[in-house]
Amino acid sequence: MRLLICDFRPHVVIVDGIVEFVASFNDESMAKQLIHELLCISEESRLAMVCVLHTNKADEDHNMRGHLGTMLAQKAGTVLECSKQSGIITVSCSDARHQEMPDWSIMFDDGGHILDADERRRQAIEQRRAELQQKRQEAANEKQKERLDYALKAIRDNGGSISRKQLTEILINKFDLKRDTVSRFITAQITEKTLYEGGNNIMSSPEQTLAL
């Protein structure tokens, strides 16, 4: 690499990947020596050096691997992380000594050519957000149905009518809810006419309120 730099005098050198220069990316002394030498080459030849190193395998750990990754991150002017999802490669700036770069995305077409994928990524994010919102709504609806079914059962078991206070206590104990949460739930069901209120009693049908 030194010989090639001396011969061609490039402005940018991409080292893909830097781990090939060491016997182990967890050897601390070797990592320090390598990063020091690369910094010296960059300074002496007045060039930008882009070093490629994989992140850790764990999904929640986005740091570069081993002592080599630690040293590289400490000395780098800018750290960019590439992630791939559904064929879209997104580049984000995880660390920078000065101003951070904005994210950008690319993808490959069927012919292997690079395409701008910023708009495709934006659409994918919106779709995932909509799907997540739908799942949350479905879970909330299922929770509400479970509470309503149990409330209707409590009303039936009590002969078709139950005091609001008694129904509130039953739902609090059954679902371990706060009193104001249960109160809002009962009020919402009365508004939606899935439960009916007559006096201080809660019923499951409007006919029962007329009979009171």
Image (cartoon, helix red, strand yellow):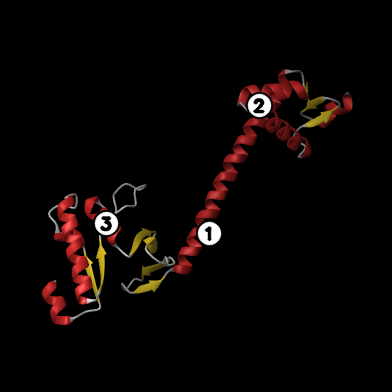
Q: Is residue 200 left or right of residue 87?
A: right
Q: Secondary structure at mark 2?
A: helix
The relative height of residue 35 versus residue 188 in the rendered view (above or below) is below
The residue under the point 14% across, 61% down is 21
Badge 3 marks a residue whose secondary structure is loop
Q: Nearer the viewer, mark 2 or mark 3?
A: 3
Secondary structure state at the residue bearing disc 1: helix
Residue 116, position as x, y percentages in the image:
41, 72
Q: CA distance from mark 1 to mark 2?
A: 36 Å
Q: Is residue 92 above or below residue 46?
A: above
Badge 3 is on which residue? 54
Cα gap from disc 1 to disc 3, whole angstroms: 28 Å
| Circle 2: residue type | Tyr
Q: Residue at x 34, y 48 (%)?
A: 61
Q: Position of residue 182 (x, y in %)?
A: 69, 30
Q: Which mark is residue 126?
A: 1
Answer with mark 1 or mark 2, whichever residue precedes in sequence.
1
Separation of disc 2 and disc 3 at Cα? 53 Å
Q: Residue furthest top?
A: 158
> Given the image, on which type of amino acid does mark 3 rest?
His
* Amino acid beneath label 1: Glu
Check disc 2 and report the residue beneath it: 150
